[in-house]
Amino acid sequence: MQGILGRQGGDDEGARANLPRLLIFLGGVAIAIAVLIWRLADVQLVHGATYETLADQNQLRTIPLAAPRGLMYDRRGVIIASNRPSFVVQVVPLQVDDPSAEIDELAKILHVPPQSLWKRLLRYNGVTYPTFDALAGVVPLGPITIAGDLSPATVARFSERADRLPGMAVELVPVRYYPFRTVGSHIIGYVGRITQEEYESRKHLGYGNNDTIGKEGLEFTYDSAMRGQNGGRQIKVNSAGAAVATLGETEAVPGNSLDLTIDWRLQRAAEAAMDRQIRVIKERIGHRIAGAAIVEDVHTGAILALVSQPNVNPNDFALPISEARYDAYLNDPLKPLFTRAIAGKYPTGSTFKMITSSAALASGLLNATSTRYCPGYFDIGVVFNDDARGGHGTLNVTQAISRSCDVFFFRVGFELGITRLDRYAAAYGIGVPTGIDLPGETSGTLPTPEWKKRVYDDQWYAGDTVNMAIGQGYVEVSPIQLLRVVTAVANGGTLMRPYLLADVRDSHGNIGMRTEPFSEGRVPVPEEDLQLVREGMLGAIESPYGTAYNVLIPHFHYAGKTGTVENVPTPDNPGGRNHAWFVCFAPYKDPQIAVVVFMEKSGGFGAVNAAPVAHDIVESYFHLGNEGPNGNGIHD
């Protein structure tokens, strides 16, 4: 009994010892329950609306809807870039159930191999994805266009089988359209799908990874103005990410439109003149050549026409361009994707004599009565020959320009020296971009002794100066740079910045931006000296001894300068065929326009290969009778 009572007393003592632990445990449970109740109350009563919104956002997705790009108009209101409706097949990867089966089904509808659809689908934003799952993980909502320009019959076939193609839909979307096809393609440019690299650099500006953007030309330069604001279709997805409902759409806002300085009638005339001359040259040398022509308002710098051939058809890029078509552009030896009017750089040939004569007159080396004798060669230890056998005799500066006497300018360049020649060339803008509102402009090359040492690790020789004085050797310009030179000669010495955009208008017609003519300064050549240069250029066309007498227009006075660039044989020009230049301004007494024409590796004189194009452009601009070039030119 005592043992039993002893054990009972021991149990009571153990229970009393465990009581504090039990109370602590129960207190902890009570606190946890209180915290849980407080948290539930906070979530549901205090922040309930906030968390409900976040939950909804986790279930909502927005599929972007492309905004129509703004239009482009010429100076008279002709639409040269617009949009057209096109039925396309778009894929939203998140909504696709069975990619392989659906691609096979779509291929039957479109009558194309499934492999071609897979190739288009997995190549997105410049990135090739190895599998559909990899693509869907990056761009779950797309939409990815994998077929375009569907016929009504194809749309009907798709509609009949749409229930077998979840995640795929036929949509009517705006597609960029260029009604004049290749005409002016290097002005307008083209559009394409944004690449991943472009997206990463522009997403802070509001660009999406499914946007269509300007890739070249004015489409590139003014992309931000024309792109508009995308709309969107909002969908709701379940926990597995599958779409369960469409909640609504936000309409896209069209982009702004551009009014250009281009005169489309003149643009087409310039393209036609270039086409004709290229055919003439092809008949003589057996193959096509490339060329460029530009027309500018000499008082404002407004570009009225800009030709760079061969052209491309920008419509090829509006929907994803086919691999075969793109390869054809890339592999064409004449490089149609290259805008040689602004990006090509070439020696100037004798057109540089405008600069050499300006330098000699302005520096006091020559005046109106100064003469130099041409025996047909110039000897400084190395002999430089003239085209005229026996020489031109004694000439003043206007006669030397008209006849393009090399020996006259060899001698004058030698007397000037490279320092003065470089200074005046720089004053005319040689060696720096013009600032035209197109991408890819070259700065050309203004050679100096320091430049030659840096590039060739060689000293400058007197022969280099003599060569440069007639536009041979190291000096290089683009057609747009040479146009700036002749514009300055024509307008009295003002360097105008060339431009293509007149103004930007919104969809209501309100002008948001306007381009004002901009002068970049004046060349340091007195007006009376420029007048002598202009007289020499007039004689080039109107004197029977002038190098461009073949493009004389009866009863109409305009002034010009020929140029021929001698080339050495190269792998892409094994015959060393010449480049041909011609520049002019018109009319002579009250200049309105300046023109430059360049014919690449055309194998003839500037008077023969380039001047006829300028002749036709001048006749078209001033609505003159079509007399046509009246001969083959004398030389140069």
Image: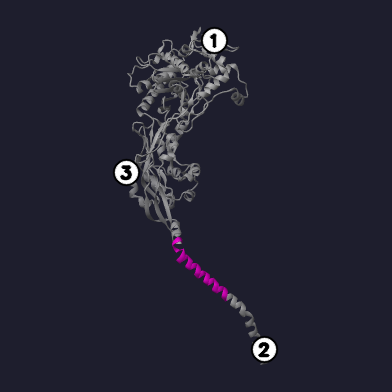
The image quarter in which residue 454 lies: top right
Numbered label attached to residue 6: 2
x, y (%) of residue 415? Answer: 56, 14
Determine which of the numbered discs, if any, sits on residue 585 in the image. none
The secondary structure type at the circle numbered 2 is: helix
Q: Residues within 10 Å of mark 3 (few under 14, many from 20)?
A: few
Disc nearer the start of the sequence (1/2): 2
The residue labelled by disc 3 is 153
1 or 2: mark nearer the eye: 1
Q: Which mark is residue 377?
A: 1
Where residue 339 appears, x then y in whole percent?
46, 29
Could you tell me which quadrant the N terminus lies in?
A: bottom right
The residues bearing labels 1 and 2 have C-alpha atoms spaced at a distance of: 140 Å
Q: What residue is shown at x 54% (from left), y 71% (from top)?
A: 32
Mark 2 neighbour class, 10 Å CA radius: few under 14, some 14 to 19, many 20 or more: few
Q: Quick check: can you spot residue 244?
A: yes
Amino acid type for the residue under numbered disc 3: Ala
Of residue 535 and residue 622, the one placed in the foreground of this image is: 535
Relative image position of residue 453 (x, y in whole percent):
62, 24
Secondary structure found at label 1: strand
Helix, strand or loop at mark 3: helix
Q: Are marks 2 and 3 in contact (CB under 8 Å)?
A: no
Residue 41 part of the magenta-drawn span: yes
- Cα separation, mark 2 vs mark 3, equals 102 Å
Bounds of the magenta span?
26-50
Q: Is residue 127 magenta?
A: no
How far apart marks 3 and 1 lie (CA) works out to 75 Å
Amino acid at dot 2? Gly
* Place of residue 593 in the rendered image (x, y in percent of width and height, measured from the top left): 40, 23
